[in-house]
Image: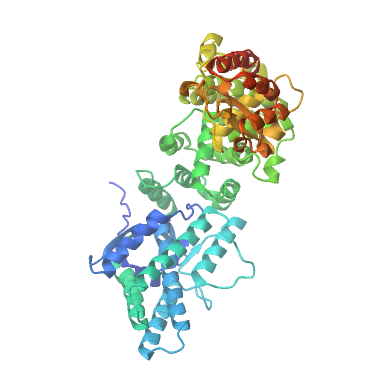
Amino acid sequence: MSIPIQIPQPAGYTIERLFTENNFSIPVYQRNYSWKENEINDFWRDLNDIVKDRRNNHFFGQIVTYQHDGVQDLIDGQQRITTSTIFLAVIRDIAHDLESSHQEMPLGVKDQLRDIQRDIKKMVRGDDGDLDSLKLQTSSQSDRELQQYFHKLTHKVKLEQSVDPITDPMKNMQLAYDEFQRWIQISLKSVKSLPEQANLLNRIFEAFVSRFYVVSIVAPSQSDAFIIFETLNSRGADLRPSDIIKNHIMYLLEDDLEKTNEQWTKISDRLKADSSSITSFIRVYWAARERIVPENSLYRVLSQELTEKSAGTQFLQDLVTLVETYDVLVNPTINKNNKAFYKSSELKSQLDILSRMNVRLYYPIVIAMTKRGFTELELTQVLNAVLSIFVRHRTILNNGTNVLENGFSSIAAKIWRSELTKVDEIILSFNNQSMHHNDSEVDAAWLVLSKEGGLRGQKKWALAYLLAELSYFDNEVDYYEDVFVSDRFELVRLAELDNQHDAVTEEFESRLGNWTMIEKDYHYNDKDEATRIAQLNTSIFPGNKRLSEILKQGWNNSEIEKRQLDMQKKMHLIWH
């Protein structure tokens, strides 16, 4: 005989009944609030259609809950319920402002505005000892700060310590509040008199609470709740992979949710509770440990391979241990802590230059080396090789990044498995990958290498790096401080020295041999030809004095080719 199963029965609710008949709680394993302008605008359009009688009602989606101790844990639907609470708070606050801003008004209008505030207070609750209709479970300081911010936003209470919207969930909540307020104010301006505005506000309120509806499913157990959440949200929904992976880890470790959430919070806090950043971190971690996986396959791959409690525990411990390293790779100079994370000045400068050039493919290598306890000196030596590989493969040959991404991930996995335990073994492994290119191939590409410069961003920094390495090659002075930290120089095309630079054709204008750098203080591009040549002669950027002499004789395609050929000899020694 088959075992009878308990099948949850869906129930339909208007928003009014949903809020007045339930106390909702957002569990610690749920994702953070993530609605932005697109979702807010869609919400308003759906509601406005009802207000203007274009539609009779609106299905607002499903919610899944797990009921215990008189509280409904929101397993799916917290985005909609959080948004609903914020929207109700906006209507209440606008009703209050309308009432307060008019000393005299018809009694019926005052009653209408007060009724709106009273009805919403009954739905949102949380005052005078009542339970909030929606509350975030808290097990960490960041949870408490988010709950405090949400309560302040939706209840307009004065808290002892004000909290600024510093995390993405807080910023999204504030954005939702501000956008709803803006939309309603625009709508109210379409009518002139106070009675008309009060009536329209009441229509907006009634349209939402009486004609928006949801379907609710109550899960029979917490385990079922995890599974329902995962099933609903792993099949084409808009959740980031990290949100579903978090749920999966909570499911594996559900016997100690508080400790598990505490560990996850350490990861989330370090990455500013940004689901996209957490997803990128997990993808880099998996590339270092196993293999590179496309982001859209990340949850599926991890859920298939992390099936036991021990595997989930190790996964989470690794993430907690390595998240600080990952954050420093992404943001090496964002704050004092990140700047001080490594002691080696050479390693710090490497990471900063790579970050400015928007090079990320090497992250798995550093993550794996950190896991295996390599020293900063060893990291520096390997990153020198990484820079050489990147410059030859990507900057000079302009090849795609897939080869580098897969190659670096393959090497990282060998480091993780302790198959590569020494620096020379790691560097030698670069030569055994398809990302290594012979000198003749690189030479041919170098002689015609062109680079666009920019005022900012990776194009600027990539070109600045090439010129600095080549120009300071025989110079004992370290260029990093002047070129990257102080940003003392600007990129200039030598052909533009002469306003009549017909001797340099369009094909050669962006050639590397036509570029140099000069002090920003000189305001080089604002000067005439003679002054520019004089300023080149006084520049401290290596090679500019010699260039000023050449430019006096005339600058043309031949000179650019000659300079680029001279650069080639240094190129081999720098990026060998």
Closest to the observer: 36 or 358?
358
Q: Residue visible at 54% across and 68% down?
A: 152
Q: Quadrant of residue 333?
A: top right
As drawn, which residue projects farthest toward the top?
A: 440
For this rendering, which residue is in front, 68 or 91?
91
Q: Quadrant of the C terminus?
A: top right
Q: Quadrant of residue 515?
A: top right
Q: Nearer the viewer, residue 139 or 297?
A: 297
Q: Quadrant of residue 455?
A: top right
Q: Residue at x 60, y 23 (%)?
A: 386
User: What residue do we see at 59% from left, 19% from top?
Assistant: 554
The answer to whether residue 531 is left or right of residue 189 is right
Q: Tell whether 467 sits left or right of 134.
A: right
The percent coordinates of residue 404 (x first, y second) are 51, 23
Q: Which residue ends up furthest to the right in the rendered image?
A: 476
Q: Position of residue 231 (x, y in %)?
A: 36, 46
Check the image and report above or below for 420 versus 87. above
Horizontal and vertical percent position of residue 341: 70, 39
Q: From where the camera sits, is residue 17 visible?
A: no
Please provide percent x and percent y for residue 138: 56, 59
Image side of residue 256 versus residue 332, left or right: left
